[in-house]
Amino acid sequence: MPAHTTAAIKLIPASHFTFEQLTAIYNQTRVDYMVPMPMNAARLAEYVATYDVKLDHSLVAATPGGEMLGVAMLGLRAGRAWLTRLGVIPNTRRNGVGQALVAGLMEQAAQLSIDFVMLEVIKHNTPAHQLFLKFGFREIGELLILRRPPRIPPLDPIVADAERLDRADALRLVGRGRGAQPWTNQSESLFNAYEVSGLHLTLADGSRGWLVYQRQKFILTRFAFKTEAGDPATVAYALLSHLHYQYPRLDTHTENIQINDPHLPAFYEMGYVESFRRIEMWHGIPPLNLS
Amino acid sequence: MTKILLIEDIPDNAELVRRALSATDYEIIHAADAETGLQMALAHRPDLILLDLGLPDYDGQTLAGWLREESTLNATAIVALTAWPEETARKMVESYGFDGYICKPITKVRKFVSQINSFLKIHK
């Protein structure tokens, strides 16, 4: 494979490609990943819609001759951008393609006067991590990707005053002061998602909190939660006991929970296992509306 | 004839498995995504399912959960094919009801065939 100089790398807006074409390029970039996370066109379309990815500001790298080299996408929300799905096709790596894509996306953000950019990189993906450090990104913390199989028998739900929340009521809660969240867990992601509902619990001792989630055909995912009063781990345990009692046959996939999240012990007690970790990285000063 | 259902989305990887098992008498059938894999499993009731954990529609863990819900597949061994670190692979395999796992990439054909044979024997 000939080396590609930066001048020989053409950056094309991703909006010039169909979802099928983008999926094919993206999947090729991941074939040798430890956690490949391939997608089909429908999943990519859902990803783009849920996470406010703007394909006209996202980029595909190719040679002038049309050979595909890689892809990178840009999410845009008020005052902030998100760099995601960066990947370079294995046999074209180490030729500046990743660097050209990141530089291209940073330029896209700058042109929109956005100087705060977020991203997550899989822990131990050293080349990507180094690349982001080189661009001035700084580490914010580690994020956990957790799974809970449906095979665990459901416990009786913890006794509490439980209120099921429909979509409208659930979404009213998610915007309320959860602190800085990774892009995937920000309020907008849930606003954009379908089949969102929630649960509000008040325990006998007055502890209370809520959990908002997306129920897909076979999985529960996209959790947002908050303890309004009491011990977060206790409240989370109660919330999860109700959730899994209600949906005993669904697999659960929750991602990007901050490693210092005080609700975390409840997840482990409830049978969640760690799948892998990501490192969250930021570039610039976060806007005040980051929640 | 012993039947193996391979659920793997990457054509090169699927071909590698086919070639590795070509010297055996096993019949290999193939699905490239989870939904097709579930349908084929129910239709063919294979002796062993070799399941890639990274699939484009639903991942291998979710699919293993569905498969384990099917009583008609109680006699089927489900083996994960994964590049995950051993510790993570072990945790996932135990949690999701797999019978075991085989690490990718497959570099030693004889070892791979021997692993498949062991899973088939253990499950019978």
Image (cartoon, rainbow, N blue to C red):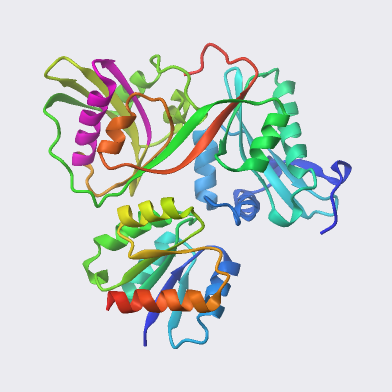
Residue B29 coordinates in the image, percent (x, y): 45, 77
Q: Nearer the viewer, residue B18 or A38?
A: B18
Q: Identify the residue at horizontal 50%, vertical 49% (top origin).
A: A42
Q: Identify the residue at horizontal 42%, vertical 50% (top origin).
A: B88
Residue A231 counted in the magenta span: yes
Q: Identify the residue at horizontal 60%, vertical 48% (top origin).
A: A19
Left or right: where A281 falls relative to A50: right
Residue B58 counted in the magenta span: no
Q: Identify the residue at horizontal 27%, vertical 32% (top origin).
A: A266
As displayed, is residue B106 above or below residue A165? below
Asked if residue A272 shows in the view, the reply is: yes
As displayed, is residue A291 above or below residue B122? above
Q: Nearer the viewer, residue A10 or A13?
A: A10
- Which stretch appears magenta? A222-245
As displayed, is residue A96 above or below residue A41? above
Left or right: where A212 falls relative to A11: left
Residue A283 coordinates in the image, percent (x, y): 65, 22
Left or right: where A100 falls relative to B61: right
Q: Nearer the viewer, residue A128 or A287?
A: A128
Q: Quadrant of the N terminus of chain A?
A: bottom right
The quadrant in which residue A84 appears is top right
Residue A108 coordinates in the image, percent (x, y): 72, 28
As displayed, is residue B51 above or below residue B44? above
Residue A115 coordinates in the image, percent (x, y): 68, 18
Asked if residue B47 shows in the view, the reply is: no
The quadrant in which residue B1 appears is bottom left
